[in-house]
Amino acid sequence: MATQTDVVAITQVTHTDNEDNEEKMEGNIHPVFASLNADIALCSKDNTTFRIHSHILIVASGWFRTMFTLPQGTACTSEALQMEEDADVLAGLLTIVSGVDLPVLNNIDYLESLLRAAEKYDMPLPTAIVRLAIMSPVMEASPIRVYGIACRMGWIPEAKLASTRTLTLDLFAPEAVAELNRLEAPHLTKLLALHRQRRDRFIAGMDDDSSSPIACPACATPAAARREYMDMEELATVLGARCSHKECQKMHYDRALTMRNIVRIVEELPRCVEFPD
Ligand SMILES: [Zn+2]
């Protein structure tokens, strides 16, 4: 933790030296972080300056806390601290930790940038807010992407819920494949295993289902319909199938019983990835 002396020393250095730098900072100062009473200035990658009180950063960020406790001359220079993040990301972090506002959190690219910066600067509050935001119903993001972020962060409830939200996706669709390619290998394997397990257990359940005849129940003519049906169109075809024996023509399936059995089989399928306790 920086001592009061450290902070005062940083303040003095920041505000008294290097007039050129002061002029540059005046050129593009973020309007929310323009206070002349602030003792630290951060400059974004795209050259916007944020003036902020160092005590806010010391409380909110392990990274800044460490930096401010380093010996003078090592920890800071007379210039604004040059940051690697762009102004939008810095503004998001600083509005959160300053308690002045919340940034708009409905874009997954922005959220991920914010999260990476929050991790880098060891800022628990922005990280916690991103954790809430990625599960928001107004977040327009692929559940595969959300799943990947949650897995990487070790957010298990969010990873499980996001994996459930992938169940309606076709993982072989191009946009899904693009998202799958972003996943780390263990997380990808886990998600593919979930989808595969559901398919295998569904087929196994149907095979065990006495309402799915492999032959006509009336005349024992082999049933022509496939039993591994997976989509509604094929299901409707199968449930309407009649015996191919021209003098029989009986329905192969008891439609109501079969539907009840299918619902039961589907309800018993795993719905999310599992993690070790
Ligand atoms: Zn028949």
Image (cartoon, rainbow, N blue to C red):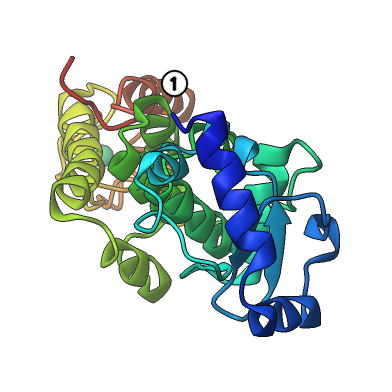
Residue type, numbered disc 1: Arg
Q: Ligand 1: which quarter?
A: top left
**Side of 97 relative to 217 (left or right):** right
Q: Quadrant of the N terminus?
A: top left
Category of crowding for the residue at label 1, using alpha-carbon neighbours closer than 10 angstroms: few (below 14), some (14–19), many (at least 20):
few
Counting from the top left corner in percent of width and height, residue 11 is at 63, 50
Percent position of residue 98, x then y: 72, 39
Asked if residue 237 shows in the view, the reply is no
Up the image or down, 57 lies above or below 274; here it is below
Q: Is residue 164 left or right of residue 252?
A: right
Q: Position of residue 172 (x, y in %)?
A: 30, 67
As rendered, which of 41 and 235 lies closer to the eye? 41
Please state which of residues 246 and 34 is positioned toward the viewer in this rendering.
34
Label 1 CB less than 8 angstroms from ligand 1:
no
Of residue 216 and residue 152, the one placed in the foreground of this image is 152
The residue where tag 1 is placed is 260
